[in-house]
Image (cartoon, rainbow, N blue to C red):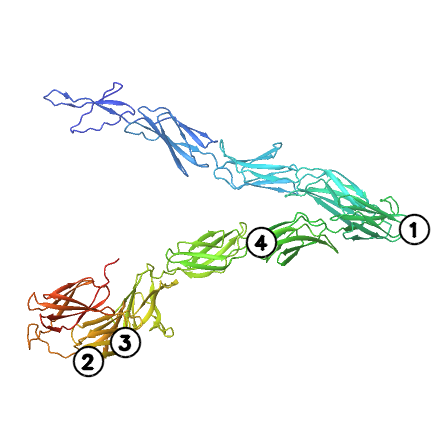
Amino acid sequence: METDSGLSETSMSNSNQKIIPGLTCGHNFSVSVTASNQQCNTTSSETTSLQSVPCVPTNVSVVMDCANNTALVSWSASRGALQYSVTARGSHSNVSCQTSDLSCSLGNLTCGSSYTVQVAAMDDSCSSVPSQAVVLNSAPCPPQNVSAHFNCSSNDMTISWDATREADHFLVSVVTDNGGISESCNTTDTECSLGNVTCGKTFTVHVTSVRGDCSSQQSQTHTVQSAPCPPQGIRGNLDCVTNSAWISWDAAPGPDSYTVSAVGGGNHTANCSTSSNTTCEVEDLECGVLYNFSVTAKNSQCESPPGATIDLQTAPCSLSAITAISQCHNSSILVMWALMEGGVGNTVYTATAEASDHSHLYCNDTGTSCYLYGAQCDLRYTIIVAASSDQCSSMRSPPYRISMEPCPPRNVTVDSSCEDHSALVSWTRSPVAETYSVVAMAADGHVHTCNTTSNNCSVSDLHCDEQYTVFVTAHHENCSSRASQNATVNTGPCQPDGVSVTFHCNNQSAVLSWTARDNAVEYYGCAQSANGEMLYCYSTDGNCTIEGLECGTVYNFSVQASDSTCNSSFSESVQRGAVPCPPDTVEVQLLPMQTEVQVTRVSWTQISCRDTEYMLTLTGSLLGDSQALFELSSYWTNSTYFEIPLPCGSSYEATVQSRNSAGTSNASVALSGTTAPCPPSAVVYSGNSTFASISWNASVYATVYTLYDNSVTPWTQLCRVVGLSCSLSNITSSSLVITASNAAGESEAELITNVIPHVRRRRHLLEVQDGDLSAPVLHITQIASTVVLVKWETEDDTSQHSLVRRKQDSSSPPEELTVYGGMILVTELSPNSNYCFTVSASGSVTSGPESEPVCVQTGPGLPQ
């Protein structure tokens, strides 16, 4: 084995595998295998290349970037390395990086952590062992919960914070708001105190943690104020009329407000405060007292010591007390006083009034009173009376304070509240008013008032749909102001009334109607189901349509009005259900009459609405009698048909209603009809066996009457007429019945009594007895509605016969036809008519007897 540097190494082994120890790191080796024995020459294998493990990186160093909390790791090149892997294992997190260079940056380090950094070299297949570990300390964490407190009595500031792990010490920086003053301290504690803090300053405080050569980011900024500085430059002057002092001073740094204190002999004290000015009026000073005035400044933290003081002597008062009375709404004040002791009658007394706006009024008199004219509302007046023009002399009274009546309140505004039908009335406060009265008067005469000491008041319980006139009056002692200018407010519309609901079952919608309101411009209709589902509609007039109702659901319908600003309350709800429609198709089927009762079977289409039931109602009269009325109903059923028996000769109207949990529908379109008529009454048979007439009384609702021979089966129809009589000839049966019919069916048969049959012996047509021909037997087949085929037996096709055709209920005479043979096709019969046919054989000399008549009714014929 030979290295890339030319060195060689030989080893022997009796196996086909060999471990080569002690390879130099980072080298490329050429490997060959030689086989030998004592008899044979050696033979070498082909050479193979072998790369050893890269060498371990050396000279590992770490440089910390404290500002960004990152670290730059560098090392010397390792023989055989293609790239390097850097790993930093910390107490709180691990970070790593890979590179082909000789340095790598570790980011996202956790503040206040200690890391062990190692570098490993790598080639394509192997990695060296890690380098010798290097310890890395990350930047410390910034302090938390920094607070600063100023001690007003000691003028010290104390800053404190929570301890931060692994910090060596802390740096505290205190800077004024304008950057002019900076103080700091360095401590290993979690608290720092600064003494003799400059007054009137706002300080910005932040704390930094330090660890080795690294500093943390600054803590969150905290601000604190020092005590305000004492005011300087105090000065003042007296107002002899009001007996007050005006004190002013130079502005001091740092205060939020100032307080002026006046201390005089005899424990007389007074004060005033201001937050925006450097001038303040100290009122209610006593006459002839020496006062010491001082000014202190305050902020949210501290109060300054008093600044320099001044002394002022108030004017003496030797006149006795005075009285003043304001003359309400007369712009004057009556001032009264007592005469000065020892005064002469011509002494002139002058009354001076100084108003709160610093204007003055004067009057004088030699007596004990005078009027001050020109007094104005909303002003307070301080009044003195002096015995000369010198107001500050000893010949003056103590001040007397009085207020004029309030001015009419100004800037009256009204904000209405739609929800509770109230209005908040506001105005500008009067400087002298003690109470206020608000009056709201509606056009309908409703009046609501409220009283308050504030500059606003709420009037409640206002009537809806009204315009209110609102005015305000201010009050002071025995005087009230004149009323303010009127303001108006329109209350919201009243809730709609007259709400009605029309339900349209065909499309499951409902039309809401209501009485429109004068002040409303829009309306909202609402349908609410029991489960809370809400459906709405909108309208600008008195109705709207709500769609999408669910069949079978009960809804509460209500309406709300709006004037675009206020909404009324919802109207009283109307409860209606989304009821099903009545069946749209109703059919009546009448079963055959039995015992003068006909079963009426009514059927209808099913409604596509869940849980629907139906009820049939039949109303009508019996035998056309308006006094004999009936009403019959089924029970509620989910079936789609019902049968009700009705007597013969009844008229009826059939209706069907549907219902479900939402309610009952209207009745369906009435279906009118009648049952089959009752049998004819008062049937009379008159005549003989050869020819007879049968008559009867009319049956109610009958359209046709039919006469039958019921001695045979099926019955033989003898006559069918619309009139009340029928003529028959050659009657052969005594068992005759009559029925009445209409479109609904046929009545039961009424037996005809006292029938006289024609007696004769039936013989065969070919039988000849005593030279007479026998009577033929007729057979009639209806070929079409107005065409019949008449047949009979005959001796041969050439024999002659006489066919007689009689039309019932007709005044026309019978028609006689001569027929050769045994049949004839009779055409051109009248539609809807009854015809009777007879035939007799006629010889050359004599004629045979007539056959028994056979009757037939023609059909309706072809449409025109």
The 10 Å Cα crowd at callout 1, few under 14, some 14 to 19, many 20 or more, is: few
Mark positioned earlier in the residue sequence (3 or 1)? 1
Q: Is residue 373 in view?
A: yes
Seen in the picture, residue 65 relative to 729 is either above or below; the reply is above
User: Regarding mark 4 in the picture, which secondary structure is present there?
Assistant: loop
Report the quarter where the N terminus lies. top left
For the residue pair 836 and 671, the one nearer the viewer reads as: 836
Mark positioned earlier in the residue sequence (2 or 4)? 4
Q: CA distance from mark 4 to mark 1?
A: 68 Å
* Left or right: where 781 falls relative to 194: left
* Residue identifier under label 2: 756
Q: Say the numbered circle drawn on residue 696.
A: 3
Which residue is the extreme one toward the bottom? Answer: 754
Mark positioned earlier in the residue sequence (4 or 3)? 4
For the residues labelled 1 and 2, say whether their Cβ atoms are less than 8 Å apart: no
User: Regarding mark 2 in the picture, which secondary structure is present there?
Assistant: loop
| Kind of residue sitting beneath label 1 | Gly
Q: CA distance from mark 1 to mark 2?
A: 162 Å
* Left or right: where 496 falls relative to 749: right
User: Regarding mark 1 in the picture, which secondary structure is present there?
Assistant: loop
Seen in the picture, residue 576 relative to 50 is either above or below; the reply is below
Q: Say the numbered circle drawn on residue 491.
A: 4
| Kind of residue sitting beneath label 4 | Thr
| Kind of residue sitting beneath label 2 | Ile
Q: CA distance from mark 3 to mark 1?
A: 145 Å
Q: Say the numbered circle drawn on residue 343.
A: 1
Report the quarter where the C terminus lies. bottom left
The residue mark sitting in front, 3 or 1, is 3
For the residues labelled 2 and 3, say whether their Cβ atoms are less than 8 Å apart: no
What percent of the width, then of the height, locates residue 143? 51, 39
